[in-house]
Amino acid sequence: MRREALWWLLPAAVAALWGSALAYDMVARVRALACVENYSMAVYQQLIASAAFDGRYFQTIHTGYADSWMWSGHRSLWMLLVPHLYRFWPSAEMMVSLQAAILALGCFPAFGLGWRSVGGPIGGAVGLAIYALFPAAYAVGRADYQELSFGIPFFLVATQQARRNSVVGFVLSAFLLCSVREEWVLSVPLVGLAVPGGVASRLRWAGLGAAVSLAYGLAVAYAGRDFEGYDNQSVGQFAGMLELGVKFNREWADARRFYLGFFVPVQWLALLAPVTLLPALGTIFLHLAAPAQGGVDVVWSGHIHHMAPVVAAVVAASIDGAGVVSRLVARLPRHVNLARGVALVAFGLAIALLGPLWMKATRVDPQLGRWPTASRPPAHAAWALAEQVPPGATVATDRQGSLLVAGRAGSFTYDESLADKLRGRSISALDYVLVPTWDLGTLRQATDLGGAELSRAGGYALVKLP
């Protein structure tokens, strides 16, 4: 084995630690019913579970949405793949663990980019640190199951493969990037512009990326030619801007407490590589113009997954920025060239120290060494109530507790989807209802219908209806 190959054990070890910490964090949030939005996670799970075990996509948890793999207007080929994986571990925990594993793979291209841009294995370690100790990357990854975040490692791989001059590698990784969700399709041509070399070389790679994007876009458009259902949010936003003009819905305070957080602790280096950073601009523009109450918020603990393309571009550009600094130091007179190595080591130590500090400042605190399968996070007591509902029974709960029943085909939210999905019928059409104990009105309605309360736990009561 070549000595250089041994260095790749470093990103493998970091990926294992980082990915397990992320998986533990996400599984803990699922089990505690403390996701960014339990309701959204529940819809995802029911769609994937229905495809896995019934062979068709449908959901009854949420009013609206289409019974299709394009359920919300998004085009993600992962909706076709994940149901096959879901059968091996049918739970929301499987979904978030899969996301953590995919994001952990980003350690490898980050290491490769650092090796090439900064120089050698030390440069690889710098690139790895820029990714693994980036608070925004972890924050995006933990924001519930969202295929959009899958694109971060694929973006880095596409960037790396273009710089290795691998046409096959670039095309495959670009296709995987497009397959995540349609928001990434326009980013692929911009990846090629950041390839070192002359204008002709950059345009050639950008043209190859455009060809992949066009081919993928046409294929997905053909696959969804008969789709009728929920409108795509991005398309709707574009249409609104064309009709009403561009209106920015953010304040300067949002820049300080949210947007600037994507350039710390050392990711400001991305500004030294503006061409590599270019793919982030479109996402930032749309984010600034998104309706303030439309599920695109500016809260670190909120719906931050929309910023996944920004995270990917900032990581790649930060590594390139570190390369710019490295090359500037290398141009110093030969007798002080030792400063290059010293500077790189000092830079790596700065990342290692500042990264954890900023993670705590942004309430992102990975629990390294925690494995969700080895040390199970504590579960909300209401899960024990949900387990008492027999298979095949119809059950409803509130939106906050929707994850408790999302893996079932006959599950509803009585405070949102029940009237729509059962055509105006009430909880009398159900076998069981799982009600928060504070919801005295629904509890009284259930008992008036002859329901019998079986047990209480975690602030919920399980009622069996006649």
Image (cartoon, grey):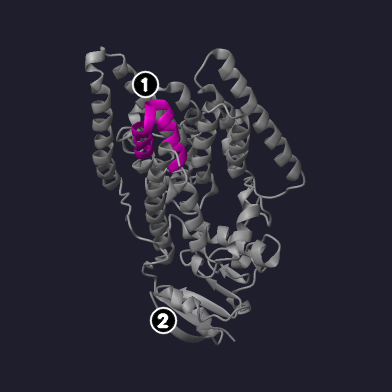
The residue that appears at 42% across and 64% down in the rendered structure is 33
Front tag of 1 and 2: 1
The reply to whether residue 314 is visible in this rendering is no
In this view of the protein, can residue 88 be seen by the observer? yes
Indicate whether residue 404 is drawn in magenta. no
Q: Which residue is mark 1?
A: 324
Residue farthest to the front, as pictured = 1
Tell me where residue 243 sits by quadrant. top right
* Snapshot quadrant of residue 356: top left
Q: Local crowd at mark 2 within 10 Å, few (<14), some, or many (≥20)?
A: some
Specify the segment rendered in magenta. 107-130
273 up-or-down from 346: above or below: above
Under mark 1, the amino acid is Val
Residue at the spot 47% in from the left edge and 67% down from the top edge: 401
Residue 110 within the segment the image draws in magenta: yes
Mark 1 element type? helix
On the rendered image, what quadrant is the N terminus found in?
A: top left
Q: Position of residue 125 (x, y in %)?
A: 35, 37
- The quadrant of the rendering that contains the C terminus is bottom right
- State the residue in front, 99 or 439: 99
| Number of the label disc, if any, that sits on residue 456 | 2
Nearer-the-camera pick, 257 or 95: 95
